[in-house]
Image (cartoon, helix red, strand yellow):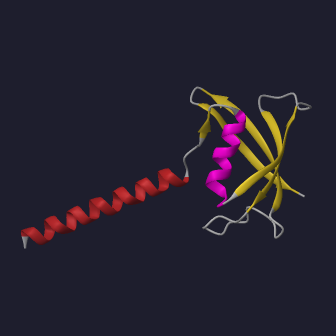
Amino acid sequence: MAKRKMFQAVVLILCIGLIVLGIAYVYRTPYGSTPEKAINVYLDTSTSRYRILEETKDSSLGSNFTRYVVTVDCNYNWIGSNEGRVDGVNTYFFDIKKSNKGWYVSSANSGP
């Protein structure tokens, strides 16, 4: 009986650990050494395949972030989120910020 309770405790601890790791993986903030690499890291996590067609820095905004307008030929990721249109071409508006860990995408929106 004691071995059964020990086994249940180990299984419970493993399940809790896997849940915590899963949550940390889903909600992590991906960083890059440059703004362009931060965009690539973001696209790696949200698409299964992508190819950047055009990348433009939008310097018209005078605020505490840097905006990039990126046209991407991408496919849906394995989870099936809507990261791309039927023709595969999508336009993203990335707001990039810098922290002590590196550059990261603070906001990503898609457009026509």
- Whether 24 is drawn above or below 4: the answer is above
Describe residue 15's horizontal placement relative to residue 99 as left or right. left
Which residue does the image show at 73% across and 45% down from the upper left? 107
Which residue does the image show at 61% across and 53% down from the upper left? 45
Q: Could you say which quadrant of the image residue 105 lies in?
A: top right
Residue 48 percent coordinates (x, y): 64, 61
Residue 23 percent coordinates (x, y): 48, 55
Q: Quadrant of the N terminus?
A: bottom left
Describe residue 16's horizontal placement relative to residue 11 as left or right. right
How many marks can you see? 0
In the foreground, 57 or 94: 57
Magenta residue check for 41: yes
Describe residue 72's horizontal placement relative to residue 60 as left or right. left
Residue 110 percent coordinates (x, y): 81, 54
Which residue does the image show at 25% across and 65% down from the upper left? 11
Q: Could you say which quadrant of the image residue 40 lies in?
A: top right
Magenta-drawn stretch, dominant element (helix, strand or loop)? helix
Q: Quadrant of the C terminus?
A: bottom right
Which residue does the image show at 42% across and 53% down from the upper left? 21
Q: Which residues are magenta?
A: 35-48
Magenta residue check for 66: no
In the foreground, 50 or 45: 50
In the foreground, 106 or 53: 53
- Whether 19 is drawn above or below 39: the answer is below
Residue 39 percent coordinates (x, y): 70, 43
In the foreground, 41 or 59: 41
Describe residue 26's horizontal placement relative to residue 84 as left or right. left
